[in-house]
């Protein structure tokens, strides 16, 4: 199996290079990996802690640990690697990291060269990033390696009779910090005992949002003290439901802020044209960081065609819809939840523990079609008591799941 895996990695490198000619995202994936070794060269002979995250969501789980390390251990350089362009492109300028780059494809030669240059004092992998050649090289060099906010599932290769080479790679981990007892039991079943059920570091991350200034003057002006729905990280299938609701069910005193996942001009224009209410875009309001003279109270729908401000926008919401749960991966529901508002998502959320939990206890409403979407938002608009009780469930859930970062830092202080 090990030989087959390495052969597939080699073949993937060729196929991806060809496909990148025709696909913009794959082009970023391939082109970005050409710069890796020149970027990390500045870390040679430096004391470095390496964090690896698949994408943006996993980075948010790494972030509380990075912040604590930079505060307590200033002598260390921080390297952050991403697997996907969607994570790298958004966080490539993160100020607390000294180097941010892609992770090379998991070949033996790449792993050896990468770790030889960086020679990290510690490697911290996030959630479910398991690359056997990198892990085997970390183990060979006896570099302390931990998993943070880990999630294990029975369907993964580690737990199959033919997954021996993947199970062997897990021996690189000095400690597993996992989110739930199921993950611990699965690791126990393959004879790993170095496990702590710590929960998810994102709870610590989102709880700090409430301590920052979340005021956006243009959002407050638009809201004008009216009931407001914020739809964050939306995809086309969710936007279709939302637009149908806005056009056919929304009252005049109901406002909507839409922050699409895809902010390309043609997609934004198509979304804008589909809405029959009065619409304005962020790019119409803010130019070079300066607000134009617009009477925002006149508009009912505000499209956010920029990135980086969605968290602050959730502070103005009375209810939220979070995209990605109808076809693709569900986006972050903890950010709106921390503000104590109800959250609506699609019906494909079983891989996201926080969503499973919140649907079960009633803080999050799962919908699968237009009828259920419309019913949920009519109920939130018309029943203030129901809306506030639902939001309170979310706020309490966040508060009761804090502390993963402290547990992990207590472990790290004896290892760094």
Image (cartoon, rainbow, N blue to C red):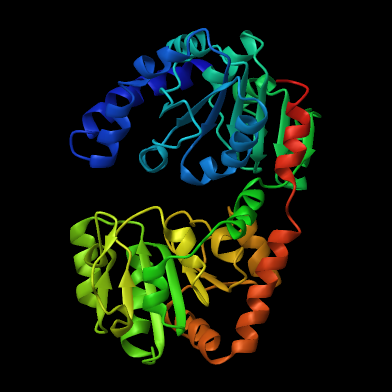
Q: Is residue 83 visible?
A: yes
Residue 287: quarter of image:
bottom left
Tell me what residue is drawn at x 59 percent, y 34 percent: 66
Tell me what residue is drawn at x 67 percent, y 30 percent: 72
Q: Position of residue 311 (x, y in %)?
A: 48, 59
Seen from this angle, which residue lies furthest right?
193
Q: Report the side of 387 relative to 30 (left or right).
A: right
Reply above or below: 300 against 151. below
Residue 197: quarter of image:
top right
Tell me what residue is drawn at x 41 percent, y 86 percent: 254
Front residue (pair 130, 189): 130
Tell me what residue is drawn at x 50 percent, y 73 percent: 317
Front residue (pair 10, 59): 59
Front residue (pair 350, 406): 406
Q: Report the side of 344 relative to 167 (left or right).
A: left
**Quadrant of the snapshot with the C terminus:** top right
Q: Position of residue 267 (x, y in %)?
A: 23, 61
């Amino acid at each position: 199996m090990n030989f087959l895996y390495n052969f597939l990695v080699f073949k993937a490198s060729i196929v991806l290079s060809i496909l990148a000619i025709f696909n913009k995202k794959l082009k970023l994936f391939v082109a970005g990996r050409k710069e890796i070794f020149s970027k990390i060269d500045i870390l040679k002979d430096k004391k470095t802690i390496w964090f690896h995250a698949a994408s943006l969501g996993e980075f948010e789980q790494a972030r509380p640990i990075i912040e604590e390390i930079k505060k307590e251990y200033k002598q260390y350089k921080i390297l952050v690697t991403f697997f996907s362009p969607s994570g790298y492109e958004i966080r490539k300028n993160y100020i607390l990291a000294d180097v941010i780059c892609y992770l090379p494809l998991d070949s033996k030669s790449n792993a050896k060269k990468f770790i030889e240059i960086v020679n990290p004092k510690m490697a911290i992998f996030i959630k479910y990033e398991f690359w056997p050649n990198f892990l085997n090289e970390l183990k060979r060099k006896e570099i302390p390696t931990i998993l943070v906010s880990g999630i294990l599932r029975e369907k993964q290769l580690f737990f199959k009779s033919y997954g021996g080479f993947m199970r062997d790679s897990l021996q690189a981990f000095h400690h597993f910090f996992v989110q739930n007892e199921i993950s611990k039991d699965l690791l126990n079943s393959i004879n790993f005992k170095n496990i702590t059920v710590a929960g998810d570091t994102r709870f610590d991350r989102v709880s700090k949002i409430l301590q920052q200034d979340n005021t956006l003057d243009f959002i407050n002006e638009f809201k004008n003290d009216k009931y407001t729905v914020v739809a964050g990280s939306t995809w086309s299938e969710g936007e279709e439901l939302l637009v149908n609701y806005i056009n056919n069910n929304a009252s005049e005193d109901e406002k909507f802020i839409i922050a699409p996942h895809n902010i390309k001009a043609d997609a934004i224009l198509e979304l804008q044209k589909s809405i029959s209410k009065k619409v304005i875009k962020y790019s119409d309001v803010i130019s070079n960081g300066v607000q134009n003279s617009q009477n925002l109270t006149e508009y009912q729908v505000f499209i956010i065609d920029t990135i980086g401000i969605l968290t602050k926008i959730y502070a103005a919401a009375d209810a939220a819809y979070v995209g990605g749960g109808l076809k693709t991966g569900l986006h972050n529901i903890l950010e709106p939840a921390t503000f104590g508002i109800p959250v609506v998502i699609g019906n494909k959320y079983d891989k996201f523990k926080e969503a499973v939990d919140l649907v079960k206890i009633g803080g999050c409403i799962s919908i699968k079609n237009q009828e259920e979407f419309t019913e949920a938002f009519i109920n939130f608009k018309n029943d203030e008591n129901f809306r506030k009780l639902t939001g309170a469930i979310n706020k309490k859930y966040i508060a009761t799941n804090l502390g993963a970062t402290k547990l992990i830092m207590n472990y790290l202080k004896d290892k760094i």
